[in-house]
Image (cartoon, rainbow, N blue to C red):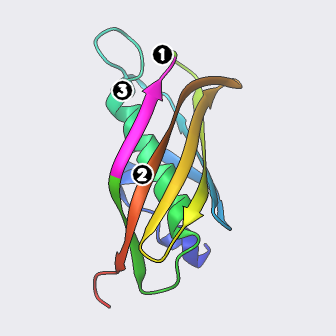
Amino acid sequence: MSENAKRVSPFTDELGVQLTTMEGGVARMYLDIARRHLNSGGVVHGGVLMALADCVAGAAAFSVLEAGKAAVTTDAHVTCLRGVGSGRIEAEAEVLHRGGRFLHVRLSERVEGRLIASGSISFMVVEARGH
């Protein structure tokens, strides 16, 4: 496991998210939709889409940080475009801007190549806990 992959949040395990790529400001993850991810209408809960967005964007952000630094979410905007109730959600994020104190990341989520959500998340760079 790479050093970057070790920096992925344990929360991803609770969601069932799998990391596929995390380097150079780009991250890719996927989530196989299970019953626990659905809302009462039988489609993936918006909170799951938001959490996946934050996870993949955070992984992209962490991939460009030096040891001893962390990225914390400051704001997020995710637009849910299509409801899905089964399949695999593939999420991708890319760092668009890296300044001294802030990072801005663009993301998308797709099922079978069809866009279901897109957005952007900003992060503040801080000292990692324990450093």
Q: Looking at the rendering, which quadrant does residue 42 occupy?
A: top left
Furthest residue toward top: 41
Q: Which amino acid is tagged 1?
A: Gly
Q: Compare marks 3 and 1 and give the one earlier in the sequence.
A: 3
Front tag of 3 and 1: 3
The image position of residue 92, as x and y in percent, is 62, 45
Badge 1 is on which residue? 85
Q: Give the range drawn in magenta.
A: 75-81
Q: Which residue position is annotated with label 3?
A: 46
Q: In what quadrant of the picture does the C terminus appear?
A: bottom left
**Which residue is labeled 2 in the image?**
12
Instruction: Looking at the image, tell me whether mark 2 or mark 1 is earlier in sequence order.
Output: 2
* Cβ–Cβ under 8 Å for marks 3 and 2: no
Tell me the distance, in whole angstroms, between the alpha carbons under discs 3 and 1.
12 Å
Three-letter residue code for mark 2: Thr
Which secondary structure lies at badge 2?
A: helix
Q: Is residue 53 visible?
A: yes
Q: Residues within 10 Å of mark 3 (few under 14, many from 20)?
A: some
Question: Is label 3 in a helix, a strand or a loop?
Answer: helix
Q: Where is residue 28 in the image (x, y as percent from the top left)?
A: 63, 50
Q: Give me the disc on residue 50.
A: none
Q: Where in the figure is residue 91, as x and y percent of width and height?
A: 58, 41
For the residue marked with disc 3, what is the amino acid? Gly
